[in-house]
Image (spheres, helix red, strand yellow):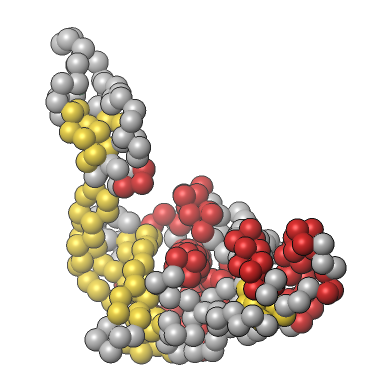
Amino acid sequence: MVEFKGHIKYAKLENRHVLTVNMGKKKHGFNICSCCGGAEVADPKGQRKVRVSQPFHNRSAVCNHRFIEKEVFLGYEFLTDMFMLDITYDNTNLVGRTIPEERIILRTAVTTLLEAIKKAISLELDIDYNEINGGWMSRSDNDGLLHLELFFYDNLTSGAGYSSLIGSVLDNVLQRARSVLKDCNCSRACKNCLDNYYNQRNHDLFDRHVGLQLLDYAETGALPEKYEKAKQQHYLIPLKHLISEETGIKEDEIPMQFEVLPALIKKPENDGKTMFVNPYDLTDWLPNTYLTYHPLGTR
Ligand SMILES: [Zn+2]
Ligand SMILES: [Zn+2]
């Protein structure tokens, strides 16, 4: 492992086995006819009848799909060079893996950063977006520290050698990733910054602000900066409207202080006087936030 900067280390891993697996919808795999090879995505609820269609027709009788293998994962293994970026991650001050809402935010942050770096690599090395692939995982080390490991590897089975070049241009790659995340005006992600045809399955997870918070932390070790009062007030508008509508209390007389924190920060416990919220609590999770407020606010 090479120490890079801040909390970032990296390693070049040569000739690694990569196993790519398609687990279908909600990890229910595929139903496959072992006679004709016809396949369908397995129904996650398992209620629908199996309906594979024959992939080709020849002179023999139409297949009646008598031998269907159910819920099979499809995958293949290949040898390639890899580049691994290791971020030592502080899950006492930042969102961790145990609380469900925090886990969603952590997943959002890493998935977004991975995507930004992947785009940055393709720009820096002047190669097609699809020539580099990537993935990530988190692991605890022997000292109980959490590590986020981001992997990048060549997409061709031969390994064109692109991933082994990343280490030598990592500074430029991270600078480009930063500008992908920073230099856009959209609220979370759009086709000008992160979204493209090939990553559409992750579009809902991309949030360039949270991705940037993670990149800043990784590069400098600094926790995300708190929002100014005016920005916090702006974020709080929907919640204050909702409280006022539901309780009849005027918005400026709500008996609770609110503090809006960047999403990557682990929120302190609400203490009955101050309630800590993040931008997700004030948008996607607003109804739940109101339910958390309500018993506190009526005390
Ligand atoms: Zn068949
Ligand atoms: Zn954008």
- Name which residue lies at 66% across and 67% down: 294
Quadrant hosting residue 141: bottom left
> Is 161 placed above or below 221 here?
above
Quadrant hosting residue 13: bottom left
> Is 20 placed above or below 124 here?
above
Q: Is residue 216 left or right of residue 55?
A: right
Q: Nearer the viewer, residue 277 or 272?
A: 272
User: What x and y, as percent, mark residue 101?
Assistant: 49, 66
Q: Nearer the viewer, residue 114 or 295?
A: 295
- Name which residue lies at 84% across and 74% down: 252
> Is 93 placed above or below 64 here?
below
Q: How many marks?
A: 0
Q: Is residue 172 left or right of residue 261?
A: left
Q: Report the residue that reaches farthest toward the front.
A: 299
For residue 291, say whether it is visible.
yes
The C terminus sits in image quarter? bottom right
User: What x and y, as percent, mark residue 94?
Assistant: 49, 81
For residue 183, say whether it is visible.
no
Q: Nearer the viewer, residue 278 or 256?
A: 256
User: What x and y, as percent, mark residue 108?
Assistant: 49, 65
Q: Is residue 32 left or right of residue 261?
A: left
- Name which residue lies at 38% across and 84% down: 88
- Name which residue lies at 21% across and 49% down: 76
User: What x and y, as percent, mark residue 185?
Assistant: 70, 64
The N terminus sits in image quarter? bottom left
Q: Is residue 145 left or right of residue 19?
A: right
